[in-house]
Amino acid sequence: MSKSDKLISAVRRNLSEVENDLMDNALAGQVNRRGFLMHGTRLGLSLPLLGALGGAMGMAAPRRAQAAGTMGGTLRIAMTVPAGAIDPVTIADDGGLMVMMQSAEFLCALNPDSTLRPVLATSWSPNQDGSVWTFKIRQGVKFSNGEPLNADAVVTSVERLVNPKNASNALSAFKGVLSPGSSHKVDDYTVEFHLDAPSGNFPYTLSSDNYNMVILPANYSGGFEQSFVGTGPFKLEKYIPKVGCSFIRNEAYWGPKAFLDRVEFTFYTDMQPQVLALQGGQVDMLAQMPVAAGRAILHDPQFNVIRCKSSAHEQVHMQCDAGPFKDKRVRQALALSINRKALVKGLFQGYADIGNDSPFCPAFPSTDTSVPQRDIDLKKARALLEQAGVGHGFSVTLTTEQFLEIPDYAVLIASFAKKIGIDIKLHVESQDAYYGKAVPGQSDWLDVPLGITDYGNRGVPNVFLNAPLTSSGTWNAARFKNPTYDGLVTDYVKALDLSGQRAVSGKIEELLLDETPVIFGYFYNYLYATSKAVSGVLPVGDRPFLQTVSISQT
């Protein structure tokens, strides 16, 4: 027996049935290194152990250059103005989340490959069926106001988000997963979460994958904008709503200190001024750069462009309970009119992956890649419209938000639809107007018959499967109600093992291709642009991690 075989055999004797299922998939070549690491960290296995096992199974680790950061300096960042007050409970926009995360931290966080790394939790593990998860909390950590991090802080932070009375933006992730009163302190540094139903991906719900899930002091009572209280590597210097803010290094940080002395954010209402500010040297970094607005920078050797594959996408919803989209053949026809390859090549210059009208993107190891890809088929689309009784076409308004490439995407959809006789008129409005209060009857997003909505990166598809598509989903703009689909999602969510997830994902993909309540045309890459003076940017989904960033000083 080889040394590698001995290591694998020795480790497997101490693994659970679910963990050994992951090993079976890896040894059979049914999961790649990324998927192996991702599912292993979800189950609470450490990255060093997984890395050693991966090496023993012939999964070569990519070689990474280690950045030698230098201490000091100020990093100036241009970013979209936050849509509202910075409140960890209710915040939902990219601008607000980016500044919040400079001072506040999660129990665990996503790595660029969607594996989970410990942050304020040191470990986590499920019971046999995944209905109870136990988290061990890091000891010796203090918040910027001097309060200790402990089980009380974790329990109150989670309970605040799962309580419907607080109108938490995280309710979409917790609904049907964790109810009020189900987070229990075991001792000062151990918390148990008793779930509503078994969930194989629950650690992602308590990670940076759930944007609102930052840990706040046990005695927190609001007013986050005044203090930005947290345990993070930076602490607030000043915040001016609608203008900008700045943070300084937290010298009392529990982990490795940030290289930068200071981070300064300037808020902009549009993307083009941000690009001009980088070109003119007024800022050092664009926190997020869409391809369309950033074409002048993409191939300019004066700048670094950092690319991060993600599950982020724009959902084109069609209301399934009224009007022409009540007939699924009409929904299928619109989806068949879209030239996805042209979208990725033209709108994104290749910085995106083609979507197949379900949340399962190439980045998810549980995606069933055997399900055929939907492609443009104008002849079939016209035939479907004839069968649905609208062969002569119809008119409809497409309402959406002024954000990233979405307005350009809307123009292209209208152009594609025109070829099959659907006349789409466009209504593009501000994000504030589009999202409204984010409840039915008070939100264009949830009330219009046809809309496009941006969804940020997630490490697992659970939120995408639930909130916008289940019958009781809080973001169900399509008004899609299908008991079979709801049951399949329940089965997927409770599966602890990768084999169990894959057994269900293909059925979900095929059902959504048939029903087509939402068009998933692509999953776009996140792009960060910096000056040549900036190094050490670690892209994590839709936000760069700044603790490792350094800037050369002249």
Image (spheres, helix red, strand yellow):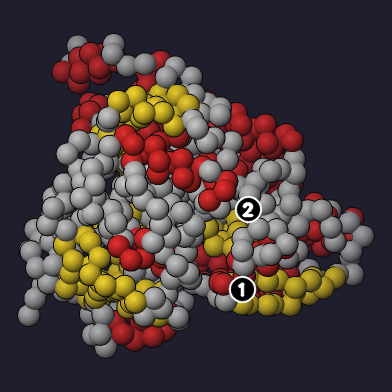
Residue appearing at x 34%, y 36% in the figure = 152
Q: Nearer the viewer, residue 264 or 189?
A: 189
**Residue 22 visible in the shown view:** no
Tell me where residue 490 appears, x and y as whole percent. 61, 31
Q: Residues within 10 Å of mark 2 (few under 14, many from 20)?
A: many
Percent x, y for residue 356?
60, 51
Q: Which residue is mark 2?
A: 475
- Residue at left 63%, top 77%? 428
Label 2 residue SS = loop
Indicate whether 509 appears above or below 450.
Answer: above
179 w.r.t. 114: above or below = above
Front position in the image: 533 or 227: 227
Residue type at mark 1 is Ala
Q: Earlier in the sequence, mark 1 or mark 2?
A: 1
Task: Give residue 109's quadrant in the image.
Answer: top left
Q: Which mark is residue 216?
A: none
Question: How many residues crowd around disc 1 within 10 Å: few (fewer than 14), some, or many (20 or more)?
Answer: some
Q: Quadrant of the C terminus?
A: bottom left
Q: Residue at horizontal 61%, vertical 63%? A: 437
Q: Is residue 320 visible?
A: yes
| Secondary element type, mark 1 | helix
* Residue 246 percent coordinates (x, y): 25, 72
395 left or right of 398 in image: right
**Residue at the disc numbered 1:** 433
Q: Amino acid at mark 2?
A: Trp
Q: Position of residue 79 (x, y in %)?
A: 37, 74
